[in-house]
Image: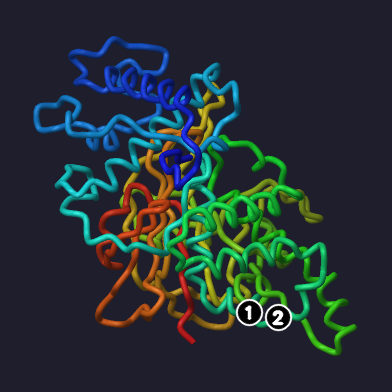
Amino acid sequence: MPAADTDGEKENPQRKQSLNAAGNDCQEQRHSSANVTKTDEQDEQGHSRYFSQQDQVMLLNDTGEVDPDLEWSFEVDDNALPSDYTGYPAIMEQVFLEALFKRVFNSTERISLTGFNGFKEPTVNRFGFPNIGQSCYMNSSLQGLLTLEDFVRSISCQERVWSSVPEAQLLRRLMDIRDTHSSTDPKHKSHCLRSFKEAVTVHAPEFRDSLQKDAHEFLISVVDQIRSLSPLLSKSAERLGRRYTCPVEDHLLFRMENTRRCKKCGAQSMRQEEFTNLSLDLVPGGSVEEMLQEYLMETELEFRCECGGRTSGQRSAFATLPRVLILHLKRFRLTSSFDLEKIQDAVRLQRDIVVSSLQGGRCYSLISAISHFGLKGEAGHYICDGLHPNNCPDEPTDSWFTYNDSVVFETTGSSVCQQRQNSAYVLFYKRHD
């Protein structure tokens, strides 16, 4: 939900003035709690409903006041907001907070942020994606997908099959994104991003507007749409005397086997389900492996058995394992007022995990992570950390990139695991073959 990159777009003075005013209003509300007047956008302690206390540390200097060195002025792409956006305070709040997050992340000065201490590494003048209007959820999802080199290559090498199929517009636009990834032309990248978003919204209109969206929901929508093309593209391949292999089914798909056992008579029944990702409950202070084990533990459910028993136990197990395992950490929950509240609990991110299945265990390495900063699902900012394209997970250089929309800087996998414990949202693990 960013909105700080103009990338050559025509400036609109009226919008800039309104956004700067919103920034000044929010700046006044970010002073230490002793000077804060509680508003509808704050809780009883005077904290912003859109910031966590950890996130607010980003905005404060050592005296507990807003850092005067932060740049509160920013510009927005004319296509980022509806023409009447000033009438929607929530949109204004989203735009300002995201621009502020980006401003702090991109600062070259030392900042005090839980899990983000130290000087920013040198920036990289390519690989980033411009913000086209609160699109950090899309940018971070795309960066995560592009770290899956074998998956992307599987799409690219079958271009003869999908290139002439009108319904495969999503694949063409995704490959355009891949081709422009290393470009330093922000205008061309912006064009490709808009075309990609337009292709996605043909079957997922919920992503058509300029509001903040959930990165996991967007990612899975893209994955599902790619998979849904498989029957059509298989027929197209047959006409060409070729065979189409669905990249999602070949790289991301796996099956879970659920076994239900009656507590009274011991009768069992089994069924298998297909998944492209798993959503894990957070285990505060727990590791990724521990959260996986929690998911696989037996649960009790009500089920009327033929023997008269009313209670059964159900246990899940991996029947097959994917080449890339996508794990979604459940960081958001609905409050009694039906707001999306973020769970700030830290979890231990692991570079390597062992995943057990009915066929045996396999080792996986973390290659990418999407993180969310902010207190609510409707606001905040998404970034992505990913393995350097030229490195392998086990190389000693351990070179990674942090993708913060159009700004990219160097980091390491070990730093990512340490710094993203409170913010990691989607994890990509690659299997060792």
What is the three-letter code of the residue carrying label 1? Answer: Ser
What x and y, as percent, mark residue 223? 65, 61
What x and y, as percent, mark residue 140? 47, 54
Give the quadrant of residue 413. Answer: bottom left
Could you tell me if the residues under marks 2 and 1 are in contact, i.e. CB atoms within 8 Å? yes
User: For mark 2, what is the residue?
Assistant: 158
Q: Secondary structure at mark 2?
A: loop
What x and y, as percent, mark residue 92? 47, 25
Q: Is residue 21 above or below residue 332?
A: above
In the foreground, 276 or 169: 169
Estimate how packed mark 1 is, as few (under 14), some (14 to 19) or many (20 or more) residues with alpha carbons within 10 Å: some
What is the three-letter code of the residue carrying label 2? Answer: Gln
In the foreground, 301 or 72: 72
Q: Which residue is located at x 72 percent, y 49 percent? A: 303
**Left or right position of 216 against 262:** left
**Residue reaching furthest to the bottom:** 241
Residue 408 seen: yes
Give the quadrant of residue 358. Answer: bottom right
What x and y, as percent, mark residue 430? 47, 75
Residue 293 seen: no
Q: Which residue is located at x 46 percent, y 34 percent? A: 11
User: For mark 1, what is the residue?
Assistant: 154
In the foreground, 112 or 167: 167
How many circles with numbers are drawn on the protein? Answer: 2
**Residue reaching furthest to the right:** 239
Q: Is residue 227 above or below residue 94?
A: below
Q: Which residue is located at x 57 percent, y 63 percent? A: 177
Q: Which residue is located at x 54 percent, y 51 percent? A: 138
Estimate how packed mark 2 is, as few (under 14), some (14 to 19) or many (20 or more) residues with alpha carbons within 10 Å: some
Res 180 label: none
Q: Nearer the viewer, mark 2 or mark 1?
A: 2
